[in-house]
Image (cartoon, coloured by chain):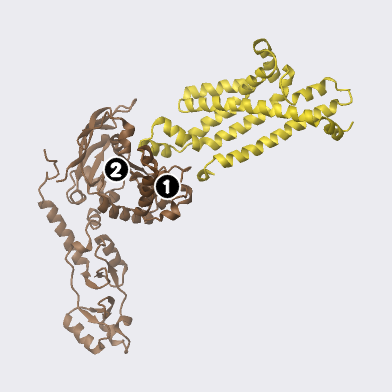
């Protein structure tokens, strides 16, 4: 069966997997954003804490994902939960690192003038520093999303959701007639999702970044 | 003597890990409605001292009074909303429009939208810009000079009595700086804020200050006095060194043409017959006559040589071009005009351009001598606050 006929007969199934794939990615990146931006805000002006947070997040990223999934089986079982937890861990570094860099790059004169006008610490952070650091933070979130899209596919190994199921199904019976189509469909689906997510971030950046700093 | 607005009482700042305090036991009274300049070499503690007034730097010991209220321990953010603050880099919020920038403190104080919008437009106008054109722009769309004006407007937004300015004109090109300084002095003549102004530039201090505190290391006051007295009567070697050579020249930028007695010069109406003009010139005992037009506006200098070669042309067309100055020009500007003009006497014109008198090198010399005598005769100690 050629690939296009395969697509024609299986598109509803692929679409379903793609939606799962996107939802899991989005959920994990959203959680990582909450945690990462929070940690970044809490530590960017404290050198030791900042260093510690970045080091831990870097260590997460070096753990091979298949090994991590394997380790999670005994703690979190199989399915969506361990996949989401792993994704959050992998997504953390780009977000937390960019939050720290973005906040530290805010012009000290701007912060001083805010302080000199009587803005409190929290107001300064939320109204001045965070909006100014936002484009850098958003870039971190974008990178995390791309990393996460690839790793979700491996989650099928522990019965997680998404396009990885087709890929693994294909790989496990590589000599059967549809094997290649299964793998190809899954891979192209992931690539297409990456493009769509990227478009979304371009749009989000336009909407959420002040014209004054674009 | 005006009332004391800000009183610093034995203010000391010790930074951790530094052997000597940055500011040591500084006591100073800042009178209401005046511009007081902190000037001194870099590292003398002038900026640290200024930042202790709005407590961006917390003093190690000593007290700060604002309107006789001890503000050393009050809530720092609330205190800062009562004090305008302008820094050299200005620090406009790049992600906010000009209107949003100016509205910062009014918003913190909880003004309603309408009042804020009105205040924003009023302030943009005050600093000489058009609200309709600039209100919705972002800082990056403004020139350096315009940003500086908006910085000042933002500091004045909630109409604070006191403004702190840290080298506010430091990062601007000399021509724009001069214009902004003049504009600011004009504005200050109307608003009469109490202003603490930090600079390392003694010329700026002399130009802008009602009073200058010259500080040496540890923010120790070497002299606290009016610019005139500091120039005429420096307290010690340090002050004299800091003013540098050319104190007499600097003094020239303190007095204006309208403050000195002007010289007189023989004039001749444009259209007078050259023969008659020649006779007038001979009778005057001067080397030239000043030609005035029908509105008594000075047009040119004519010498005997010009009159001989007039050949029926109007006198205004044959003479040497003039250097004219207005009554508000400083003697320094006037001297500059004289030196660059062909004829080394400056003609003073009133606002309508009419002839008012002349200034020559002797007039200027006399003015300097008069100033020196006056300052020496004034008793010392008239700067002490009423107790």
Whole-number angstrom distance, CA of label 1 to CA of label 2: 18 Å
For label 1, the crowd category at 10 Å Cα-Cα, with few meaning under 14, some 14 to 19 and many 20 or more, is: many
Chain seen in brown: B
Pinpoint residue A185: horizontal percent, then vertical percent: 80, 30
Name which quarter of the figure residue A117 lies in. Answer: top left
- Apparent side of residue B325 relative to residue A76 in the rendered image (left or right): left
Q: Decide: is A198 above or below A211.
A: above
Pinpoint residue B198: horizontal percent, then vertical percent: 30, 43
Query: At 23% across and 73% down in the image, what residue appears?
Result: B355
To which residue does mark 2 refer? B160
Q: B135 or B338, which is in the foreground?
A: B135
Of callouts 1 and 2, which one flags the residue occurring earlier in the amino acid sequence? 1
On-image quarter of the C terminus of chain B: top left
- Apparent side of residue B41 relative to residue A212 in the rendered image (left or right): left
For label 2, the crowd category at 10 Å Cα-Cα, with few meaning under 14, some 14 to 19 and many 20 or more, is: some
To which residue does mark 1 refer? B99
């Amino acid at each position: 069966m050629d690939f296009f006929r395969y697509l024609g007969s299986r598109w509803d199934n692929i679409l379903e997997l793609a939606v799962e794939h996107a939802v899991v990615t989005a959920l994990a990146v959203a959680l990582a954003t909450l945690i990462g931006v929070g940690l970044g805000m809490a530590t960017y002006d404290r050198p030791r804490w900042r260093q510690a947070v970045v080091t831990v997040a870097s260590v997460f990223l070096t753990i091979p994902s298949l090994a991590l999934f394997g380790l999670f089986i005994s703690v979190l079982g199989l399915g969506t939960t361990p996949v989401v937890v792993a994704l959050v861990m992998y997504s953390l570094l780009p977000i937390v690192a960019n939050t720290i860099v973005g906040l530290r790059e805010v012009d000290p004169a701007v912060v001083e003038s805010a302080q000199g006008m009587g803005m409190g610490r929290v107001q300064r952070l939320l109204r001045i520093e965070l909006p100014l650091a936002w484009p850098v933070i958003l870039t971190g979130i974008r990178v995390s999303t791309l990393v996460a899209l690839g790793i979700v596919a491996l989650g099928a190994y522990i019965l997680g959701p998404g396009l990885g199921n087709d890929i693994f199904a294909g790989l496990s019976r590589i000599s059967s007639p549809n094997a290649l189509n299964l793998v190809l469909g899954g891979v192209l689906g992931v690539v297409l999702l990456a493009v769509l997510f990227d478009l979304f971030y371009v749009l989000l950046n336009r909407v959420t970044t002040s014209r004054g700093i674009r | 003597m005006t009332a004391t607005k800000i009183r610093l009482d034995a203010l000391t700042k010790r930074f951790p890990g530094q052997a000597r305090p940055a500011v040591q036991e500084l006591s100073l009274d800042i009178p209401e409605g005046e511009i007081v300049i902190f000037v001194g070499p870099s590292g003398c503690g002038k900026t640290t001292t200024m930042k202790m007034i709005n407590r961006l730097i917390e003093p190690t010991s000593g007290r700060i009074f604002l309107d006789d209220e001890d503000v050393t321990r009050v809530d720092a953010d609330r205190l800062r909303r009562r004090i305008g603050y302008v820094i050299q880099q200005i620090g406009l919020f790049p992600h906010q429009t000009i209107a949003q920038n100016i509205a910062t403190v009014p918003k913190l104080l909880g003004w309603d939208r309408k009042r804020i919008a009105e205040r924003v437009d009023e302030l943009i106008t005050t600093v000489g810009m058009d609200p309709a054109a600039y209100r919705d722009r972002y800082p990056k769309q403004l020139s350096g000079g315009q940003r500086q004006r908006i910085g000042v407007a933002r500091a004045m937004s909630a109409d604070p009595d006191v403004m702190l300015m840290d080298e506010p004109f430091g990062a601007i090109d000399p021509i724009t700086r001069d214009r902004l300084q003049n504009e600011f002095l004009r504005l200050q003549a109307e608003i009469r804020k109490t202003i603490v102004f930090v600079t390392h530039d003694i010329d700026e201090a002399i130009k802008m200050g009602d009073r200058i505190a010259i500080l040496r290391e540890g923010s120790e006051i070497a002299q606290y006095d009016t610019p005139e007295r500091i120039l005429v009567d420096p307290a010690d070697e340090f002050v004299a060194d800091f003013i540098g050579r050319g104190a007499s020249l600097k003094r020239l930028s303190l007095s204006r043409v309208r403050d000195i007695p002007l010289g007189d010069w023989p004039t001749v109406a444009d259209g007078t017959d050259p023969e008659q003009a020649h006779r007038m010139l001979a009778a005057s005992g001067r080397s030239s006559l000043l030609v005035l037009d029908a509105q008594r506006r000075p047009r040119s200098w004519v010498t005997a040589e010009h009159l001989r070669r007039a050949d029926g042309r109007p006198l205004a067309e044959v003479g040497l071009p003039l250097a004219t100055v207005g009554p508000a020009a400083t003697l320094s500007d006037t001297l500059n005009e004289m030196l660059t003009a062909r004829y080394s006497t400056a003609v003073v014109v009133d606002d309508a351009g009419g002839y008012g008198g002349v200034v020559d090198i002797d007039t200027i010399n006399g003015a300097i001598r008069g100033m020196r005598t006056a300052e020496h005769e004034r008793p010392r100690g008239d700067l002490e606050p009423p107790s």
